[in-house]
Structures are given as structure tokens and as C-alpha cells.
Image (tube, rainbow, N blue to C red):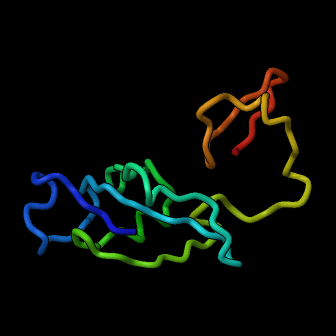
């Protein structure tokens, strides 16, 4: 990930991202076997306030201490991401039942009241 920031947040490239810093990050998320899960490298950066709980805990941990234009590889443990895989807790649904614009990590509620994380 390589965060950048507004002039007010990181006054110079010598400062690093800390709790309370607003950052913009390009990232590439992969599974343990290297399969790409999601990426915004060729698109707009993800902007968030470090420490505000707007992104996965592991992502917040990973950007702390980074400087403008720095690149870093961060391994997220399940507890810092989407949790451990639990057999029987996964379900298959038709793609047309998922609201448009839903992305990985979003919570979805279905008509029958069931909720799940995408």
C-alpha cells in the first residue's frame, strides 16, 4: 500500500501516518496462494482516517508509520480481516439478490431477515 494525504494531514514527506491521519491508499489484496481478491491500483485510492474503524484493522495497522509514496507488504491475520473460515457459516446466493454496488466486507440483509458479510 502506498498512502498519500492532503497537505493539512501530512505537511511533509518526513511525517508518517498515525492514528488520526487521513490517508489515501492504493492497494492489492491477495489470498495466501497469491490469488488477487481485490485491487484499486488502477483506480481511485481508498481514503480513510487511520484509527476510525473505516477499514479492516489489519489495514489500519499496516499503514501506521508509512510515509507518502512508501510501498509496504502487509500480511493480515484472519482476526484483523474477515475472521476465520467457519464450516457451515457460508452460503451461496444468486448474484442478482445482492444489491448493486456491494463489495467485499459489506453487510447485506436479505428479505428473509438473514444477514451476511459479502
The structure residue drawn at horizontal position 49% and vertical position 66%, both measured from the top left corner, is 58
**Is residue 8 shown left or right of residue 79?**
left
**Relative to 34, 14 lies left or right:** left
Look at 29% across and 56% down and name the residue there.
23
Q: Residue furthest top?
A: 111
Q: Residue at x 8, y 61 (%)?
A: 11
Q: Position of residue 26 (x, y in %)?
A: 40, 60
Q: Residue furthest front?
A: 42
Q: Is residue 118 above or below residue 38?
A: above
Count every numbered label the image shows and give the total.
0
Of residues 43 and 3, the one nearer the viewer is 43
> From the viewer's perspective, is 86 left or right of 33?
right
Quarter of the image for residue 82 reads: bottom right
On the rendered image, what quadrant is the C terminus found in?
top right
Residue at (43, 48) in percent of width and height: 54
Q: Position of residue 20 (x, y in %)?
A: 25, 55
**Where does the image place residue 105, in percent across and percent down from the top left?**
61, 48
Judge whether 34 appears above or below 86 on screen.
below
Q: Position of residue 50 (x, y in %)?
A: 33, 56
Residue 108 image-quadrant placement: top right
Image quadrant for the N terminus? bottom left
Is 117 above or below relative to 97? below
In the rendered image, the vertical position of residue 54 relative to residue 77, given as above or below: above
Amino acid at each position: 500500500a502506498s498512502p498519500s494525504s492532503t497537505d493539512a494531514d501530512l505537511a511533509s514527506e518526513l511525517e508518517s501516518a498515525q492514528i488520526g491521519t487521513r490517508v489515501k491508499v492504493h492497494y492489492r489484496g491477495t489470498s495466501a496462494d497469491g490469488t488477487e481478491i481485490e485491487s484499486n491500483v488502477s483506480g481511485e485510492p481508498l481514503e480513510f482516517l487511520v484509527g476510525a474503524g473505516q477499514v479492516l484493522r489489519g489495514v489500519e495497522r499496516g499503514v501506521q508509520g508509512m510515509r507518502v509514496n512508501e510501498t509496504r507488504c502487509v500480511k493480515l491475520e484472519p482476526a484483523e480481516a474477515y475472521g476465520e473460515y467457519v464450516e457451515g457459516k457460508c452460503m451461496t446466493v444468486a448474484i442478482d439478490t445482492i444489491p448493486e454496488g456491494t463489495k467485499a466486507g459489506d453487510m447485506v440483509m436479505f428479505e428473509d431477515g438473514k444477514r451476511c458479510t459479502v
